[in-house]
Amino acid sequence: MKNQADNLIHLVDEKRKTNDVFMKNSNVQIYTVASGKGGVGKTNIVVSLAISLQRAGKKVLVMDADLGLANVDILLGISPKLTLYDVMFKGRKIEDAIFEGPEGIKIIPGGSGILELSKMDVMEKRSFINQFKMLNGFDIILIDTGAGISMNQLSFITFSDEVILVTTPEPTAITDVYSVIKIISSLKLNRKINIVVNRVKDEKDALNTFNKLNETTTRFLGIELKQYGFVADDIRVNTSVMNQVPFIIKYPNCLASQCIDNLAKDIINNRKNKIKVKTMDEFYNRLLKVFG
């Protein structure tokens, strides 16, 4: 883990030296969605949030970057012909791996069992990241990463505009997400860290969870987090997972769906004040500096 962090510190230093300046009037906003542990409902939130944003008129791409246990396609009950694996290792074009999901969102499936990007050779890395220059016309890109702290997850955090960390009120989930924040802090990344508390009884429960985490990170890491909303504990979410239909579609008026809609509104209302990449070429440049 230390070697991974050291490698990222070196990459971040190189990135700073290039004077990477982002334009405020650009259209692409990149979010890396991560968690400290598995089973907190991260992918569920990513898919439903993408649908809510698409309904609001935004063009959304979901990239399943969990290169070990990709599950966006499983959640939707689909069997894609091409995945990120084919783009990375078989020379397929990234646009061929994009398929249309519910209500018009676009998805790049991850492909379970993929080795970490750090294990790719130089030519494979260059070929892979060059594919991202083909991506155009999106307002928001949501990158669903694996749980825990891996080189992949940290790399995607490095070049995203903002980080959305998903946790639950469970002590183990809070401890694990704090570990992720601690690593981000050690890299001295200038990234806003937004917290979404999932499976809460009510708003008070969410606020208590957030306050505990925020007090700890402020005191020991000097990082002030942003409460980015919460998602209510709703039995209909589990029912939707079993049916392989996003809960925001199957139960659009349930409490969990209302929470997702509120989160989407917050993202849209605050986009003007957020740092965005100017073009997909800028997205490519970030990838090159991280993985190249």
Image (cartoon, rainbow, N blue to C red):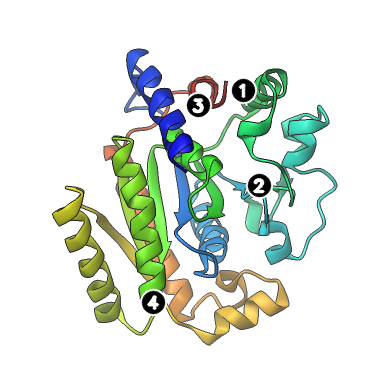
Marks 4 and 3: CB-CB under 8 Å? no
The residue under the point 51% across, 62% down is: 42
Label 2 Cα neighbours within 10 Å, binned few <14 / some 14-19 / many ≥20: many
As measured in the structure, the alpha-carbon distance from the residue carrying label 4 to the one carrying label 2 is: 26 Å
Name the kind of residue labelled 2 in the image.
Leu
First of labels 2, 3 by sequence position: 2
Name which residue type carries label 3: Val
Q: What residue sits 35% from the left and 67% below the top?
A: 174
Residue 204 horizontal/vertical position (percent): 24, 80
Query: Which one is in front in this view, the residue at disc 1 or the one at disc 2?
Result: 2
The amino acid type, in three-letter code, at marker 4 is: Glu
Q: Give the residue number, with chain letter if any, for mark 2.
A: 67
Q: Nearer the viewer, mark 1 or mark 4?
A: 4
Query: Of label 4 and label 2, which has the lower sequence position?
Result: 2
Label 1 packing within 10 angstroms: few (<14), some (14-19), many (20+): some
Element carrying mark 4 = loop
Name the residue that disc number 3 marks.
Answer: 290
Dot placed on the residue nearer the N-terminal end, 4 or 3: 4
Q: Which mark is residue 22?
A: none
Q: Say which residue label 1 marks.
A: 133
What residue is drawn where x is 48% and y is 50%? 149
